Image (spheres, helix red, strand yellow):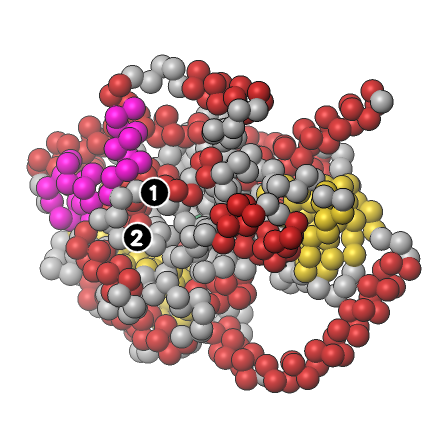
Amino acid sequence: MATKATTAARTSVAKAGTAAKAAAGKTVKAAQAARAAKASRASGPADYDAIVVGGGHNGLVAAAYLARSGARTLVLEARNKTGGAATTEAPWPDAPDFRVTRLSYVMSLLPPTIINDLQLERHGYKIFPMGPYYQAFPEGGSIKLYADDAKRNYAEVSKWSTKDADAMPRWDAWLAGLADVLGPLLLTVPPNLGSRKPRDLEQTLRLAWRHRGLDVRTIADVTRLMTMSIADLLDDWFESPQVKGALAVNGVIGTWAGPYEPGTAYVMAHHSIGDVGDGHLGNWGFQEGGMGAVADAIANAAREAGAEIRVSSPVRQILVKDGRAAGVILENGQQLTAKVVVTSLHPRTAFLDHVGRDNLPGDFVQDIEHWKTRSGVVKINLALAELPDFTADPGTNLQEHHTGSVEMAPTMPYIERAFTDAREGRPAVKPFSDGVIPTAFDTTLVPEGYHIMSLFTQWVPSDWNQAPHTEELQAYADRMIDCYNEVAPNFKSSILHADIVGPYQMEHEYGLVGGNIFHGELSLEQLFHMRPAPGFADYRTPVPGLYYASSATHAGGGVCGIPGMQAARAAIADRRTALRGSRRR
Ligand SMILES: Cc1cc2nc3c(=O)[nH]c(=O)nc-3n(C[C@H](O)[C@H](O)[C@H](O)COP(=O)(O)OP(=O)(O)OC[C@H]3O[C@@H](n4cnc5c(N)ncnc54)[C@H](O)[C@@H]3O)c2cc1C
């Protein structure tokens, strides 16, 4: 069966068709906006302590912390619902009982501090731990890899290479050791490296002191991890193409880089961190009710703390008065004021569109203009009548291999070929996929007996954010489905509905500029003190009173909430300092 293009994709085309009508209505809208602005000025601008732009999970975390600190806080979200890329939706109007976790699909990096501070479990945060990594090979056979079962991993890997099975425990221990070094850095506010201001120097020294225990070997290992490709790194450890393919996936997730590109070893480690320094993180898992339920839990916590959340309220401009953030202007012209503004939008939107080049230093503007924001990701969400029946592990009854990630990344050259296709300007002939079937645990998403399978796939060309490419996406999704059908012959015929979300839709409907899933690539030059720009990695911005909470800051991306928490902490600390100062005067 051929897949059906989504309603949403069709809507984008329809929207283009009505562009002329929209232009005609523009004058009317402008007049309405002017009237709204006048009315708002006449009644006096609304006054909040803090305004958060964007109701994605980071904006909501920031709002929850700000409200808990006693600030009168308002969240402004453009869409008709909160959550941003952490969203559960029913994309098929003719099958409203099927809900999909439409973009992001698994949890792992949300730290215990945030879960506990915001009491998220009480607000509905509930994770089902994922089962094993699973790959069925087109040439026959399969492999399963477990997060925490060395004995079973040995049995699985030795099916392909006993040498690799012997190496596996040493690899796991090596990686865990490095993750222990890198993990706590995720909760560290990056120092302003190179600055000679006393506060910056102190922070740099403090960071160096904290790592004084690292020995020559560990520093060498971290250097390797930060600079090597995942392919070269795995070649140093393993021999079997199947095992290397399985371990390479995390190195290229969401990345505009194939497995042979330097830096992809770090991306793998980013996805393997188990502890950010305040307690052990859960293994990868599915949120009950999909990723939208994570955002809902945070929104509930924010509301309970007193935050106001307005949806369908797109912001047009961040107000800067006398060099300070002063509030926002909405698309409808309404003006809202606050001394603290936190924005959680993509850096191009937040700074170039909303703050404006004239209000920012030239080198900062240039850094944001040069920000790399490609992915070539296509999300394919499928409603299934039955579970995939793999030739290597037969049966449509629920089995362990349905409960984790159901991959289509059989070898390193396969993954590399998919990237090379896209870099040369074509969608991958055989895309790679990180698939999951959340309904193996979560029965709230579908009518009884049915399933959702969510395929996170790569790559299409990096400029596909510029046009919908509806028909080509359809063909790409059909090819992806054929790849699974080769190893599970009931797959194609089990598909009831398909929802294909490409880079254009990610940018235009969700604000993910360039289609990058993290608001910006996790490439080495965009990490830590460089995220989003040198000198401004401490969640502050060149505009006093304006704070930055998006996934384009350190610890983003991913649904980890750390940028939101850190931006709120910076704002609260500055507010307290200012209050102390004004009391002394
Ligand atoms: C396909 C895909 C798969 C992913 N998979 C995973 C995964 O499995 N696990 C994981 O941890 N991470 C995953 N990620 C990454 C993760 O979802 C993001 O990094 C994270 O959700 C971003 O959160 P945020 O709050 O920083 O930004 P966003 O979620 O982008 O939120 C920004 C919000 O601002 C709103 N907005 C935009 N413009 C305006 C405006 N003018 N005015 C007001 N509001 C505005 C948007 O509508 C949005 O709600 C995935 C992302 C994608 C796209």
Q: Is residue 71 above or below residue 81?
A: above
Which residue bears the numbered disc 1? 267
Q: Is residue 438 above or below residue 298?
A: below
Question: In 3D space, how far apart are the residues under numbered discs 2 and 1 (Cα atoms)?
Answer: 10 Å
Q: How many marks?
A: 2
Q: Residues within 10 Å of mark 1 (few under 14, many from 20)?
A: many
Q: Are marks 2 and 1 in contact (CB under 8 Å)?
A: yes
Residue 500 counted in the magenta span: no
Disc 1 is placed on an element classified as helix
Residue under the image location 68 percent in, 60 percent down: 316
Q: Give residue 584's position: percent from left, percent from top.
A: 83, 20
Q: Give residue 46's position: percent from left, percent from top.
A: 83, 51
> For the stretch drawn in magenta, what is the main secondary structure?
helix
* N-term mark: 2 or 1: 2
Q: Residues within 10 Å of mark 2 (few under 14, many from 20)?
A: many
Disc 2 is placed on an element classified as loop
Query: The magenta stretch spans which residues?
Result: 219-245
Who is closer to the viewer here, 408 or 458?
Answer: 458
Amino acid, disc 1? Val
Residue under the image location 38 percent in, 60 percent down: 377
Amino acid, disc 2? Ala
Q: Is mark 1 within 8 Å of ligand 1?
A: no
Q: Nearer the viewer, mark 2 or mark 1?
A: 2
Who is closer to the viewer here, 418 or 220?
Answer: 220
